[in-house]
Image (cartoon, grey):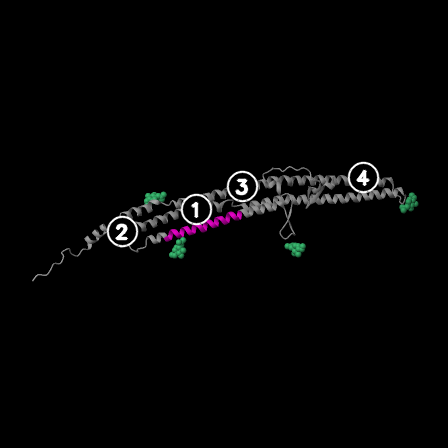
Amino acid sequence: SVGSLININCVTFPHPDVMPEQQLLKPSEWSYCDYFWADKKDSQGNNTVSGFEILLQKQLKGKQMQKEMAEFVRERIKIEEEYAKNLSKLSQNSLAAQEEGTLGEAWAQLKKSLADEAEVHLKFSSKLQSEVEKPLLNFRENFKKDMKKCDHHIADLRKHLASRYAAVEKARKALTERQKDLEMKTQQLEVKLSNKTEEEIKKARRKSTQAGDDLMRCVDLYNQAQSKWFEEMVTTTLELERLEVERVEMIRQHLCQYTQLRHETDMFNQSTVELVDQLLRKVDPAKDRELWVKEHKTGDIRPVDMEI
Ligand SMILES: *[C@@H]1O[C@H](CO)[C@@H](O)[C@H](O)[C@H]1NC(C)=O
Ligand SMILES: *[C@@H]1O[C@H](CO)[C@@H](O)[C@H](O)[C@H]1NC(C)=O
Ligand SMILES: *[C@@H]1O[C@H](CO)[C@@H](O)[C@H](O)[C@H]1NC(C)=O
Ligand SMILES: *[C@@H]1O[C@H](CO)[C@@H](O)[C@H](O)[C@H]1NC(C)=O
């Protein structure tokens, strides 16, 4: 039956030529717990990386992406703040402040609308900060530490498995030697080449049996270690899977919040612009002329013809 198994990096697998029927633990879910049992060569092809390590790298990369998204939103906020500042500054500009009449009123309202618009952008930037940037930035503050703990936990179990495997190999060698020794002594007795007594052969047989028992115990301990590793791999990879689902959901939710806020600024207080439109509709050149003439007129007595 040893021939139907192979051992890779101290983990025992069924031999590929005699694959037994193995059901996936979570069929059709593409679950982490089903697809990361073997080790993998790294990009240089020298060191092997455990399947678990690959899952951890995905987690750390996800954490990094989350952080970079927060940075990106910060840049977005800065643009919005600067834009608001520019609008607000421009609204206080005194250009054409001396325009008069109904046109002057419409012009003043247009300038005021810039301040209102600035307000909308400022509100957007502040909501972006509290409802998108901060949550993205603060999600899972101790994540790297937690992942390191996970890493050590599984690595320790794997090391333990390796030491159990070494013990099995040692016991296997010891048994082989004991068996050879017994065989040799038996032969020597048969051909009477030596004075070995039955007693000594009994002793050799006992030692050989003991070595066999030793090996069985070592295999048993090895299997226990592999079971423990297996169980922890299943629970831990399922936990990593849950964390990744949670991360994706969290980010999706906050990006939706971004688009929601962005829509709100688009529907930017139409009333501020509408107020300008209203005043523009009321612009009346005749009325403005009347007002202006009343204020600046210099005399309405017309000149007449000269008389002799
Ligand atoms: C990887 O192995 C190649 C030879 O197989 C060797 O030249 C190279 O230095 C090794 N790289 C590392 C990082 O160990
Ligand atoms: C704001 O105005 C400055 C110049 O006063 C300009 O360099 C900058 O690009 C403007 N920013 C935005 C977002 O409009
Ligand atoms: C074998 O035993 C005999 C007598 O019992 C003794 O004379 C002889 O020296 C022994 N030979 C060896 C190699 O021990
Ligand atoms: C829109 O502008 C009007 C007048 O400027 C103001 O009363 C109102 O609160 C604003 N609404 C929003 C949603 O900003």
Q: Nearer the viewer, residue 269 or 226?
A: 269
Residue farthest toward the left in the current orientation of the protein: 308
Amino acid type at mark 4: Arg
**Nearer the observer, disc 4 or disc 3?**
3
- Measure how far apart labels 1 and 3 are at the Cα level: 24 Å
Within-10-Å neighbours for mark 1: few <14, some 14–19, many 20+: many
Label 2 vs 4, first from the N-terminus: 2
Apparent side of residue 175 relative to residue 53 in the rendered image (left or right): right
Q: In terms of sequence position, does the residue under pointer 1 or pointer 4 come before the other?
A: 1
Could you say whether the residue bearing mark 3 is in a helix, strand or loop? helix
Q: Nearer the viewer, mark 2 or mark 1?
A: 2
Q: CA distance from mark 4 to mark 3?
A: 58 Å
Q: Which residues are magenta?
A: 63-86
Q: Residue at x 54, y 43 (%)?
A: 244
Which residue is labeled 3 in the image? Answer: 245
Which one is closest to the eye, mark 3 or mark 2?
Answer: 2
Q: Cβ of disc 4 within 8 Å of ligand 3?
A: no
Identify the amino acid type marked 2. Answer: Leu
Numbered disc in front, either 1 or 4: 1
* Label 2 to label 1: alpha-carbon separation: 38 Å
Instruction: Mark 3: give few (<14), some (14-19) or many (20+) Cα within 10 Å.
Output: few
State the residue position of label 2.
103
| Mark 1 / mark 3, whichever is N-terminal | 1
Name the mark on residue 206.
4
Which residue is disc 1 drawn over?
Answer: 128
